[in-house]
Amino acid sequence: NDVWLELLGTWAGARRTDPGSGVLRLGELVDRLEEMGALVTMTLYRSLLADLLIRAGAVEAALEQLAAAIICSAAHGERFWYPELERRSALLLAACGRRAEAALALGRAREESVRMGTIALTRRIDATHL
């Protein structure tokens, strides 16, 4: 199906121009893919939506999307993006002054990246400053 292609095109186009312009459409496409049962890749799609929301200055909405992606990751066993989702959440939480929550999120990210054996990602997490 071409929905995921439109989703990627919408994300890429809005990222190059005006992030706010693609948020609504990208949200609709994420919802449609979820309705179609594309649950394993939902973590990636919600992360892309969070990316646009961050760039558009909608930090709380971005945190909501990252939280939804983390829940989806746990519910469907898709752990590939989990450490990065937690790391990005930690950065946003820290930017909002929620340092204790940020430290916990970064700790979860590191713990999972070590468990997964992803040395490069663990180094990226270790280099993350809150």
Image (cartoon, rainbow, N blue to C red):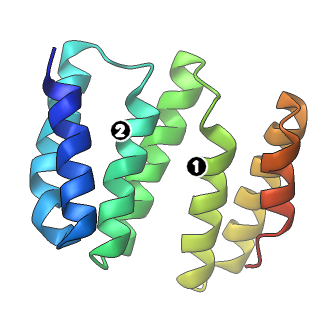
Answer left or right for 55 relative to 63: left
Lower position in the chain sequence, tag 2 or tag 1:
2
Can you tell which quarter of the image residue 58 is in? bottom left
Q: Residue at x 23, y 28 (%)?
A: 4
The local secondary structure at tag 2 comes to helix
Determine the residue positioned at 20% across, 44% down.
Answer: 9
Q: Taking 37 as reference, is 119 above or below it?
A: below
Residue 52: x and y in percent read 30, 63
* Quadrant where the N terminus is found in the figure: top left
Q: Type of residue at label 2?
A: Tyr
Q: Residue visible at 59% across and 27% down?
A: 74
Q: Position of residue 59 (x, y in %)?
A: 38, 73
Residue at mark 2 to residue at mark 1: CA–CA distance: 12 Å
Q: Amino acid at mark 1?
A: Leu
Residue count near mark 2 (Cα–Cα under 10 Å), binned few <14, some 14–19, many ≥20: many
Mark 1: which secondary structure?
helix
Q: Is residue 89 left or right of residue 64?
A: right
Above or below — where is 68 with respect to 93?
above
What residue sits 80% from the left and 38% below the top?
112
Query: Which residue occupies the foreground of this view, 76 or 25?
Result: 25
Which label sits on residue 85?
1
Looking at the image, is 12 positioned above or below residue 116? Answer: below
Q: Which residue is mark 2?
A: 45
Closer-to-camera residue (110/120): 120
Q: Residues within 10 Å of mark 1 (few under 14, many from 20)?
A: many
